Image (cartoon, coloured by chain):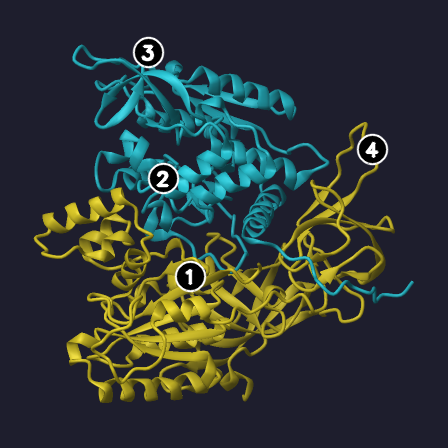
Chain colours: A yellow, B cyan
Amino acid sequence: MATDLLRLATAGSVDDGKSTLVGRLLYDTKSVLADQLDAVHRASVDKGLSTPDLSLLVDGLRSEREQGITIDVAYRYFATPRRTFVLADTPGHVQYTRNTVTGASTAQLAILLVDARKGVVEQTRRHAAVLGLLGVPRLVLAVNKIDLVDYDEATFEVIAKEFAAHAAALGYARENVTTIPVSALVGDNVVDASERTPWYVGPTLLEHLETVPVEPDPHEAPLRFPVQYVIRPRTAEHPDYRGYAGQVAAGSVAPGDEVVVLPGGTRTTVSRIDTADGPLTEATAGMSVTLLLTDDLDISRGDLVAGAQDPPVVTDEVTATLAWLADKPLVAGARVLVKHGARTVAAIVGELRTRFDEQRLSTVDNPESLSLNEIGQVVLRTAEPVPVDDYRTHGRTGAFLVIDPAEGNTLAAGLVGAPLPLLGGS
Amino acid sequence: MTATVHRPATRPSLDALGRLESEALHIMREVAGEFDRPVVLFSGGKDSTLLLHLAVKAFWPAPVPFPLLHVDTGHNFDEVIEFRDRMVERYGLRLVVAHVQDWIDDGRLAERPDGTRNPLQTVPLLDTIGEHRFDAVFGGGRRDEERARAKERIFSLRNAFGQWEPRRQRPELWNLYNGRHRPGEHVRVFPLSNWTELDVWRYIRREGIELPSIYYAHERDVYLRDGMWLTEGPWGGPRAEEIVLRRTVRYRTVGDGSCTGAVESDATSLDEVIDEVAASRLTERGATRADDRLSEAAMEDRKREGYF
């Protein structure tokens, strides 16, 4: 039931054929409807192409079609009898890496494409680092355009080996990385197994996507419940009702559970879990519910209800890793806003501790700045204490946005702690 | 009191529709918590009716904390307007109506030669957002509808002219939404982004949500134009050469009457509609919306101007 859905993202360098691969998956799983296909056929003929350009199924913006590149994430929904898929097709151009981060932040699996003629390139290493940082649990390396190297096994093996070493350094266990030779253009090993790669005995891409285990929701973790909104009807029917609405970020909650409200630290007990469909005996991670508490406390949006047993750390000094997504570089002393759960607080970047060199897999201590697409560890001082978890153990309450207080733009993806093994060593 | 409560062996967890519902409630509560003057675009169509249903659930037992806005082209289906007004009364809501006719009457807009008023909605929409200082505008748009919509964020910032700038979209990470905007700007919010047409219908069945009757098969006088069955109305049809026929039809989408086509269908119940949608080889917009057929980038161009 809960595992019938797989959220996946594509990544890889520009011109590696991501949009064509996604188009092929949609086409071969018969997820393309007749009018969409007609439109692609018409546009392909207009461009003088002899076969339909399947990338036109996903490249939706005018400038994308004109330039023949993907600029922004396209979300696609398709299903096979075995599983439902939400697919984020992300851009390969380095300028649009922030959109790749957007697509990957919620993915359970990422397909990283390389061109068999070029092998692992700079953008492959950059995307792999971003995927590792975000903790995308599983990777598929799709060695595309295998037809253009005459289906050569040795070429495939060299690429597979080089990537395996890179992924291992980013913390990926071997069983969580699958390498498949494909041709998105011709269709080899995408949906149907290819007769031209007899040396490859693994699954086709779709078979793998249909059978790969999906991480279960963190039901067994300690409770984390960010309060989004206080529900106070003040109606004749409900004069004194006071409920705390939110989505369970981790763990589970039941009436009778002892909880602590952070950052204040007050302890109380859950008296009731409400939904519009009636009260629940238990709510688990992912559910949007309303909690009622036995004590009449001053709780508002931004507070975090946590299990009394294993609450998060409350601190005004947060060591975190940032993926910097803005054109303007980050320097020490910058004033920013941090959006964590349902709370937004002012913060100062006190210290740039290390910059991660994702090409050499090394770190640089005390860098001057973090520029667009760079990853680094920083120390943030927040104006008020915030309850934070390590990103690796609690993704939802270990993640935050860094926002420009003046312009309002999102500057960085923030992750509490050191989600990459190499960062933890310094 | 002990903190550890014995839990049953099987933990409750969400199915696919439950996940979509929970995500939508989360989005609506974020907007209620972060914005001063949100509004829900409500036409009485199935997607906006679903939005309203989710808003009622998100804030229950309190009333929905925002008003509704309908941009009324004047080219309406009577059944839909009657339904709209009944829903407003049922949930005790405030409805703001922007009549396109008012903009035509005082010269701010001119009637198009083809008689369709769908593209004329943008100016009244933006004027009304400005006049009421709405800062968050909920829409029922879904990413599966069309290629340009597939690229849009759940929180979509619009500049002071109401325009969507695809190259300047913010990163949207995890389930953390950035709703910050400068004075004059606003944010369009799409809680149904990740739903498909089939999800919408299955959820409507599961929740027992009432819809306007024209979504189900009925007999109607229609005429064929550009491969779509259009109905008679004040929008200038049928032309002399177009023959009016009585057909059993239903609507897959409901918009301006001049450009919303019916499909031939015998589906009179939700189960039959779901079977029909699941078997369909056409997207709902491709099948029934003349406005999206104008050019390859018809939707993107309208969105850039401030349309949904």
Res. A284 image quadrant: bottom right
Are labels 1 and 4 on one chain? Answer: yes
Task: Report the residue marked by disc 2.
Answer: B163
What percent of the width, then of the height, locates residue A338? 57, 61
**Distance between the alpha carbons at the discs numbered 4 and 3:** 49 Å
Closer to the camera in the image, B167 or A109: A109
Whether pointer 4 and pointer 3 mark residues with C-beta atoms closer than 8 Å, the reply is: no
Circle 4 chain = A
The image's mark for residue B234 is 3
Amino acid carrying label 4: it is Pro
Is residue B45 rendered to the left or right of residue B286?
Answer: right
Q: Do labels 2 and 3 share a chain?
A: yes
Q: At 39% from the left edge and 16% from the top edge, which residue is drawn?
A: B74
Label 2 amino acid? Gln
Q: Position of residue A117 (x, y in %)?
A: 19, 79
Which quadrant holds residue B292?
Answer: top left
Q: Name the residue under label 4.
A: A239
Q: What element carries label 1?
A: helix
Mark 2 or mark 3: which comes first in sequence? 2
Tell me the kind of residue under disc 1: Gly
The residue sitting at 22% across, 13% down in the picture is B243
